[in-house]
Image (spheres, rainbow, N blue to C red):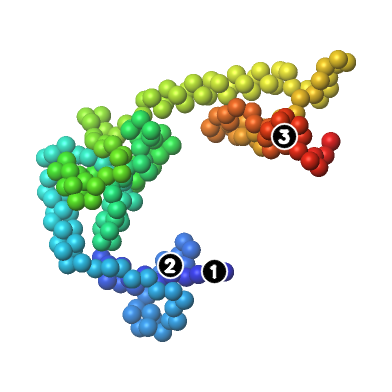
Amino acid sequence: GHYIAYVKNPIDGNWYEYDDTYVTKKSAADISRLEAYALFYQKKSPEKDQERKEILARIYKDSGVEIPYFISRLWFNRWQFTTTPGPLTNYDFLCKHGSINLKRYPKIRNMVVKVPYSVYTTLVYKYGSDGSPPYFSTDHGILGCVICEKEEKMLEQRRQKESLDIGMIDTNTIKRGEYWFLISSKWLSSWHNFKSGGPPPGPINNYSFLQEDGSPKPRMKR
């Protein structure tokens, strides 16, 4: 079915109707006439509200003084609007090397919030960290991971070579004395996905139609 959500904005105090991509401002009288299917409440805490005010003030005050650190906007939004945001995490925009994920790089400025170092350490002290490394700005601004970039170039070279090699030997006919070999269509699909820019397919796995002893599974069609 299709559901419409009505949410009260904690910043401006107004109600809004969310209908897919359409957002419409509503009055309290409009909301009072609705019959809700489900209700969601936000836990409030005067202590947390005061904490938010103090930290937000520090962000604006010290933004040009201290080294800027970047934290996940998703986590920051949870911190702003919930009392239990969980440990601070940056894994939604960092790669395995602790730098900016190249796939996230085009939208990185929408995915992070810049905070002073002292604010970063305060948040980690209060809420902990999931182990994701901190990311701070340099004189060159926000940069993508150079290791990932090098690895991606090597993968692209591999894609081109494999596509060329397979294209040269792929055929629908074989000579007398040669054999057909079967491979999993699922694995082959993952290789085609790799050829189009996806991750490497890994070793060929035929267990979708073979048993552990290498014989075909029962009821396999020829």
Judged from the image, the secondary structure of the residue bearing numbered disc 3 is: loop
- Does any portion of residue 81 appear in the rendered image? no
Report the front residue among 89 and 99: 89
**Rendered location of residue 135, percent (x, y):** 27, 36
Residue drawn at x 27%, y 44% as measured from the top left? 129
Q: CA distance from mark 1 to mark 2?
A: 12 Å
Q: Is residue 222 left or right of residue 170?
A: right
Residue drawn at x 14%, y 43% as measured from the top left? 118
Provide the residue designation for mark 2: 18
What kind of residue is marked 1? His
1 or 2: tag closer to the N-terminus? 1
Name the quadrant containing residue 52: bottom left
Decide: few, some or many residues near mark 3? Use Cα within 10 Å; few <14, some 14-19, many ≥20. some
2 or 3: tag closer to the N-terminus? 2
Q: Nearer the viewer, mark 2 or mark 3?
A: 3
**Rendered location of residue 36, percent (x, y):** 44, 78
Judged from the image, the secondary structure of the residue bearing numbered disc 1 is: loop
Provide the residue designation for mark 3: 210
In the current view of this chain or complex, which residue is farthest to the right?
A: 176
Q: CA distance from mark 1 to mark 3?
A: 43 Å
Report the front residue among 207 and 92: 207
**Rendered location of residue 1, percent (x, y):** 57, 69
What kind of residue is marked 2? Tyr
- Asked if disc 2 and disc 3 are in contact, CB closer than 8 Å, the reply is no
Q: Give the tally of numbered discs.
A: 3
Provide the residue designation for mark 1: 2
The quadrant the C terminus occupies is top right
Decide: few, some or many residues near mark 2? Use Cα within 10 Å; few <14, some 14-19, many ≥20. some
